[in-house]
Image: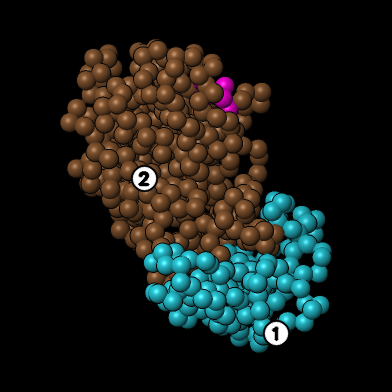
Amino acid sequence: MPADARTVGDGLIAGAPDAPELVGSRCRHCGVVAFPRQGSCAACTSDDVEERRLGRRGTLWTWTVQCFAPKSPPYAGAADGFEPYGVGYVELPGEVRVEARLTEADPARLRIGMPMELVLVPAPGSDGALTYAFAPAEDR
Amino acid sequence: MTASADGVAVVGVGIHPFGRHPGVSGLDMAAIAARAALRDAGLGWRDVEFAAGGSDAGGNADTTVSVLGLTGVPFINVRNGCATGGSALATAHAMLASGAAETALVVGFDKHPPGAFDPRPEDWGLDPWYGETGLMLTTQFFAMKIQRYMAEHGISASTLAKVASKAFSNGARNPNAWRRRPLSEDEVLGSKMVSHPLTQYMFCSPGEGAVALVLATGRRARALARTPVWLRSVAFRTRRFGSFEVFSPSIPLESAPSPTSEAAAAAFGQAGIGPEDVDVAQLQDTESGAEVMHLAETGLCQDGEQEALVQDGATRLDGRLPVNTDGGCLANGEPIGASGLRQVHEVVLQLRGDAGERQIAGPARVGFTQVYGAPGVSACAVLSR
C-alpha cells in the first residue's frame, strides 16, 4: 500500500490499491474465519487465532440501498448532496460473509448470488481516505 | 426459569400513552404508568416488595421512587437494549417464583428524540470506521435480513405492506397508540423508500411512552379482587455463534437458531404450552419484515407460511392468530424500554376481554409476547387465563 493511499481503520485493509485485501483472522483451533481481525474465536472461544488476508471475490448474499443520509456522528459524510449507496453481505467462499458498501446503488442491478470483487473507494467525508467496497465482478 | 407450584400472575397493568409528549419526562411517564398499574391491582406502593425496570435513554428507573415514595423497596435497574422490558419482567418473575418476594412492580419507559437511532460504535465493541463509513444502521440490517428471507422463503412486498397496514388499522382502535390513521397497502408500498425493500411506513419510529405491570405470587393474586392473568413463563437469550444479528461487520458461513427461536422454545417448554395453543401474539415489529420473520422464529408458523397467513388475513383481529393487536411498534412507535412491557399489557387486556374496540374475535385463553433487540437479545413470555 503506497504511503499516499490512506485507508480507514487500523490494519483493516492490506494489499495493493488495485488489488486490496481485507485483513481478518482465522482460529487455529476450529478454523472459523472472522472480519475484522479478532483476538479470540466467537465460535469455539479459543484465543489461538492468526491473521488472515481474505479472498477478494465472492457472491452477493444479501443487499439493500441506504436511501437517507445516516446521522452524523457516527457517519462521516455530509447530509447535503447525499447520494444513496448500496450495502450488502458478500460471501467469500470457504471463509466468511463480509458486510460492505457496494459500488452499485441501483436496485435493478443488484441480485442475490451475483459475483462481486473487492475494490477501494473514497470514504465518506472529505479527508481523502479510502474504504473498501464490493463491485459487481461482471463489470470488470 | 419455571414458575413455582403456586404460580406468578399479572395482577395490574398501567400505561402512559405512546407518542410525543413535550414537557413530560420519561420518569414522569413511568410514575404515571406505575400508579395506574397499582390502582388496577388494588394495591398500594407500600405493598410492593420488589421492583425492576429500565429505559434506554429516559433515565434511571429506580428514580421513580422519589415520586412514588421512599419505602426501601429493592429496585433493580435494567438496561438491555430493546429487550429491557422483557429482561425486567424475567427478573421480577424469578424473584417471585423463588419466593424472595410476594409482589413486584415492573416498569419500562423511554423518551427518544425524532429520527433514526444514532448508536456509537465504541458502545458496541466496534471501531469508529464502521459508523463513519455508513454501515452502522439498524434499518440497513433489518432490510438485508428480510431481503435474504424473502428470496429464500417466497415472501412478497405485498405481504410486508399488509403487515404495516394491519398495524395501523389496529392502532386506530387503540386510544394509547401514536399512529392512529389507517393506511392502505398501496399507501405503505408507495411511501418513500428507506432501505430496499422497506419503505417509510414499514418502519416504526423511536418515540416515547411507559408501561408498568404489577406481579404477584399465586397466593397473593387469588386474594385480590381482579381475576389474575397467569405469567406461565419468561425466557430470555442472547445470540449464539452463527445467528445473523445487527451491527455485524461479518457473519459466519454456518447459521444457528436466532435468540428469539431459543427464547421462544424455552418459554413454551417451561409453560408446558405449545405455539399451536396461542390465541393472540405480540411480536417485535420494528419493521414489517421483523413481524414476518418472528412469526416463524417463535414457532407460530413454519418458514414461508407467513405469505399465505398474511395474505389470507389470519393475523388480523378477526383471524385465527391475531398478531400485534394494539398496533405493535409500527403504530405505537418504539420507546425502547417500554416496548416489551407494552406487549404484555396488551396480552393481559386481551385475555381479560378488556381490549375494547380491538378485542379479538376468537377465544383468548393463551397469549404470547416476544421482544428482540440489538445486538441479539430476545425475551419471550407465555401468559394464560
In this view, the residue in front, B364 or B101, is B101
Residue B83 appears in which quarter of the rendering? top left
Q: Going 45% across and 61% down the picture, which residue do you hit?
A: B244
- Residue A110 located within the stretch drawn in magenta: no
Residue B352 visible in rendering = no
The local crowd at label 2, few if under 14, some if 14 to 19, many if 20 or more residues have their Cα within 10 Å, is many
Amino acid type at mark 1 = Ala
Q: Colour of chain A?
A: cyan
In this view, the residue in front, B173 or B123, is B123
B156 in relation to B205, above or below: below
Q: Position of residue B77 (x, y in %)?
A: 48, 32
Chain letter for brown, please: B
Q: Secondary structure at mark 2?
A: strand
A127 in relation to A1, above or below: above
**Labels 1 and 2 positioned on one and the same chain:** no
Q: Write the start and end of the magenta stretch as one range.
A: B26-31
Q: Position of residue A109 (x, y in %)?
A: 61, 75
